[in-house]
Image (spheres, helix red, strand yellow):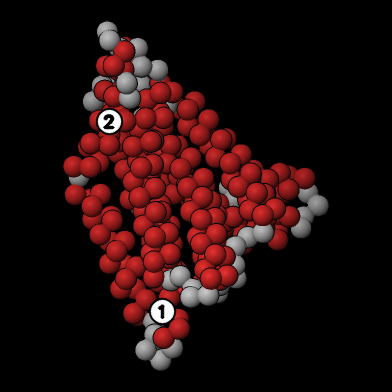
Amino acid sequence: MKSTEHHRPLFRFCTYSLFRRRSCWLLLLGAMLFVWGAPYFTPWDEQPQILQPARAQAAWMYVWMSAFTWFPFQAAILGRRLRTHGVLEFLRARGVRAGSMYAQIGAALAVWFGAVVLFAGGMCLSFCQPRLASEAQQWTLLVAQCSVLAVVAFLPLLWLGIALGTRLDEVLAFLIPVSLLFLGLFAAPWIAPLLVGSDAPLFRLAWLLSPHTHLADLTARLVFKMGPLAGSDFIDSLTCLTLQGVAITLTGRCLIRTSS
């Protein structure tokens, strides 16, 4: 078999399939409508200065809402259907490795998540940019930090959902990444005082092993114009999320099933 036949077949197939689905375009259209319309539900006519921060908040709220809904659902569906329809088994028989298939399916969905993140960042830079040059530079850096951390935090969960979809029912494959995202984004900061402040090694270990996706949510800094993270703080957050992502991605790689 020619090598060109093995050249990212699943990435091209999944990308084309997602491109043809109307839900992908509705995802981007929904981002435009939500980011533009949601801020008008605030008392902006009495305080016009809150319109820009509200628009920035809406942009990143939409990123995280899509991370809780559309993307894990698509990951679970893709993993389930590609396995049950025999596509993964066929490609495995043709010499495509499971790790390569795992990466290609996730990359196809990562393109769309990247598009949503770029849209959110573009809205912040286009309609929420401060007028002063010094503030604009800090704003651009903050938006870049938001984008990088969101991608690093969420994409491993996307790959995990694909792997779970090849083994479990779509509902479970959807709920597990969503639960991890909820735990890391909302629950972890709530339980941090209990776990970190405890003298019990088990509690401290639980905090260490829990997801820390909350490090990627810089929405408050955007809304209140607190400026970007300091370089050391950003590197620490990025390192933590990268290590967490590597662990989740490798777990998914161990779980992926190609036989139908």
Residue density around tag 1, few if under 14, some if 14–19, many if 20 or more, within 10 Å: many
Residue found at the very far bottom of the displayed protein: 46
Is residue 136 shown left or right of residue 1? right
**Residue at horizontal 53%, vertical 30%?**
250
Residue 105's disc is none
Quarter the N terminus occupies: top left
83 w.r.t. 41: above or below:
above
Residue 249 point in image, percent of width and height: 50, 34
Q: Secondary structure at mark 1?
A: helix
Is residue 76 shown left or right of residue 64? left
Residue found at the very far top of the displayed protein: 1
Residue density around tag 2, few if under 14, some if 14–19, many if 20 or more, within 10 Å: some
**Residue at horizontal 34%, vertical 46%?**
112
The residue where tag 1 is placed is: 51
The residue where tag 2 is placed is: 12
51 w.r.t. 141: above or below:
below
Amino acid type, residue under disc 2 in the picture:
Arg
Residue 239 in view (yes/no) = yes
Residue 89 in view (yes/no) = no
Estimate the spatial distance between the alpha carbons at disc 1 and disc 2, rounded to whole Å.
40 Å
**Residue at horizontal 38%, vertical 42%?**
110
The image quarter in which residue 214 lies: bottom right
Residue 66 point in image, percent of width and height: 37, 55
Is residue 205 shown left or right of residue 161? right
Question: In this view of the protein, which residue sits in the foreground, 48 or 216?
Answer: 48
